[in-house]
Image (cartoon, helix red, strand yellow):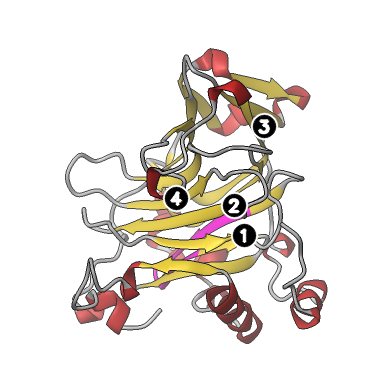
Amino acid sequence: MEHKNLSINFLLFLLLGAFNLSNVLARPATFLQDFRITWSDNHIKQLDGGRGIQLILDQSSGCGFASRKQYLFGHVSMKIKLIPGDSAGTVAAFYMNSDTDTVRDELDFEFLGNRSGHPYTVQTNVYAHGKGDREQRVNLWFDPAADFHTYSILWNHHHVAFFVDNVPIRVYKNNEARGIPYPKSQPMGIYSTLWEADDWATRGGLEKIDWNKAPFFAYYKDFDIEGCDVPGRRTCISNPNNNWWEGPAFRQLSAKQARLYRWVRMNHMIYDYCTDKSRYPVPPRECLAGY
């Protein structure tokens, strides 16, 4: 996708560091330090001494991996290069999950494959206290298969924020005071998968996967997890103000971030459950409470 609609002002925001989370202490790790393969180990290959991995999808299987620990609040990021060319019907996911059967908490990035020449769509979703169905979809303003880009989740007591290259694309605020569920009591692991989902992933399932293009490859590197591991350091959880992700600068979007967030919503958001009257004739409470 060409950058024709990327305004000069937007580029200036990025160049001036609208809010560069990479300036905060980072701890990139090798894959096996923080993660384990959960599904189809012959479809995940380590690269560059374990600093990167290749995920493979073919007709025999997809694959997946998960963090070795669970975390309660923090900041998680990975650099990902998605499937190039005709990736219709494929889904690569990067998400956090409490791994509980009924009362699930989950924070999702899902990258929905596309036909060549069409923009890649990223879908986000938030599950809190077992309730999900909070999908939003954004068309990315760049080609995410041409190079690596950074995808991050910031989760603290005040909000959950999803970032693409440090640009916020989704914010879910803590509105528990208004009776709206917020994930805050269950630790979550970090997961990623690559699989076939051509019954829904591309244009609602109209575009099917072309196995003649297989195998499909996605690449990951620069794994960074900063959070309170559970079980682990009790003082990390009991003294949240000592953790940078709980600091005043991270409790809401900065003015520059807020402008970037509005830019994304105005120019690249293609679906928001809050405005889907066929699903929700009355908007969900969190929509009325504001983003």
Residue 239 painted magenta: no
Eye-nearest disc, 3 or 2 = 2
User: To which residue does mark 1 refer?
Assistant: 140
Residue at left offset 72%, top offset 31%: 51
Q: CA distance from mark 2 to mark 1?
A: 6 Å
Residue 203, numbered label: 4
Q: Dividing the image into 4 quarters, which one contains the C terminus?
A: bottom left
Residue 143 picture location, percent across and down:
71, 52
Q: Main secondary structure of the magenta part?
A: strand
- Where does the magenta region start and end? 151-161
Residue 106 horizontal side relative to residue 139, left or right = left
Q: First in sequence: mark 4 or mark 2? A: 2
Q: Say what amino acid the circle numbered 2 marks.
A: Tyr
Badge 4: how crowded within 10 Å, few (<14), some, or many (20+)? some
Q: Which numbered dot is residue 120?
A: 2
Mark 3 is on which residue type? Thr
* Badge 3: residue crowd in 10 Å (few <14, some 14–19, many ≥20): many
Q: Residue at x 71, y 58 (%)?
A: 142
Mark 3: secondary structure? loop
Contact, mark 1 vs mark 3 (Cβ under 8 Å): no
- Left/right placement of residue 25 relative to residue 44 reads right
Instruction: State how far apart marks 1 and 4 are (Cα).
Output: 16 Å
Crowdedness of circle 2 by 10 Å Cα count: few (<14), some, many (20+)? many
Q: In the rendered structure, which disc, 4 or 3, sits on the residue that comes first in sequence?
A: 3
